[in-house]
Image (spheres, helix red, strand yellow):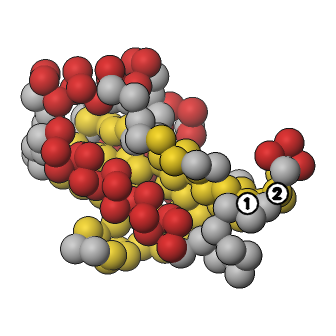
């Protein structure tokens, strides 16, 4: 990856990290689980009456040079499992709480087929939980790499 792209990605990650801190997320860096290293894990637990209980919201990011769709699916599944296991609540899973997981792959380059699959495939379904994978392409100002052509990261800025 060239230096301009790296600088753009780093500046973006700095802004997002600060936004997480401002919004009350606990941050951890360089977490390894099931042979997957997450560069950053942001987690917040709060009571949401409209969801009838507690909601554990997690954003997990990792860098990839040029991943295929199977690598990204695997990353998404491992992210959800990590978010579910390290939830921070002592209640039995799904009893008055749910998990919302945003696995975000930061990629240097992505082929058209993988990009199309990310935009068109429905995210995995879970009972009382959500897994919403997305991605950001380094060096691209508005990298629409999530379902329905929306930018997961854009809403964080």
Q: Which quadrant is home to the N terminus?
A: top left
Give the residue displayed 44% in from the left and 68% down from the top: 82
Q: Which quadrant of the figure has residue 12? A: top left
**Picture coordinates of residue 11 (x, y %)?**
39, 47
The residue at which mark 1 appears reads as 97
**Picture coordinates of residue 74 (x, y %)?**
24, 54
Q: Can you say whether 121 is above or below 19 in the image?
A: above
**Picture coordinates of residue 4 (x, y %)?**
20, 40
Element marked by disc 2: strand
Q: Can you say whether 47 is above or below 144 in the image?
A: below
Give the residue displayed 26% in from the left and 46% down from the top: 73
Q: Is residue 2 visible?
A: no
What label does residue 53 carry, if any?
2
Give the residue displayed 55% in from the left and 58% down from the top: 58
Crowd class of label 1 (few under 14; some 14 to 19; many from 20; radius 10 Å)? many
Q: Which quadrant of the figure has residue 120? A: top left
Q: Is residue 76 visible?
A: yes
Count every numbered label the image shows and give the total. Answer: 2
As drawn, the residue found furthest toward the bottom would be 90
Q: Is residue 149 left or right of residue 128?
A: left
Q: Is residue 55 left or right of residue 31?
A: right
Q: Which quadrant of the figure has residue 121? A: top left
Pick whichever, 126 or 86, lies toward us.
126
Mark 2 and mark 1 lie on one chain; the one further toward the N terminus is: 2
Rounded to the nearest angstrom, the CA distance separating label 2 from label 1 is: 5 Å
Crowd class of label 2 (few under 14; some 14 to 19; many from 20; radius 10 Å)? some
């Amino acid at each position: 990856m060239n230096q301009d792209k790296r600088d753009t990605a780093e500046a973006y990650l700095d802004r997002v990290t600060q936004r997480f801190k401002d919004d009350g997320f606990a941050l951890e860096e360089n977490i390894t689980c099931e042979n997957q290293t997450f560069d950053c894990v942001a987690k917040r637990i709060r009571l949401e009456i409209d969801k009838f209980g507690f909601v554990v919201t997690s954003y997990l990011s990792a860098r990839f040079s040029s991943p295929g769709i199977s690598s990204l699916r695997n990353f998404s599944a491992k992210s959800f499992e990590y978010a579910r296991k390290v939830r921070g609540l002592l209640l039995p899973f799904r009893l008055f709480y749910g998990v919302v997981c945003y696995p975000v792959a930061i990629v240097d380059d992505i082929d058209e087929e993988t990009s199309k699959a990310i935009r068109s495939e429905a995210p995995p379904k879970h009972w009382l939980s959500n897994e919403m994978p997305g991605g950001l392409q380094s060096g691209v100002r508005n990298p629409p790499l999530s379902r329905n052509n929306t930018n997961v990261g854009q809403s964080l800025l």
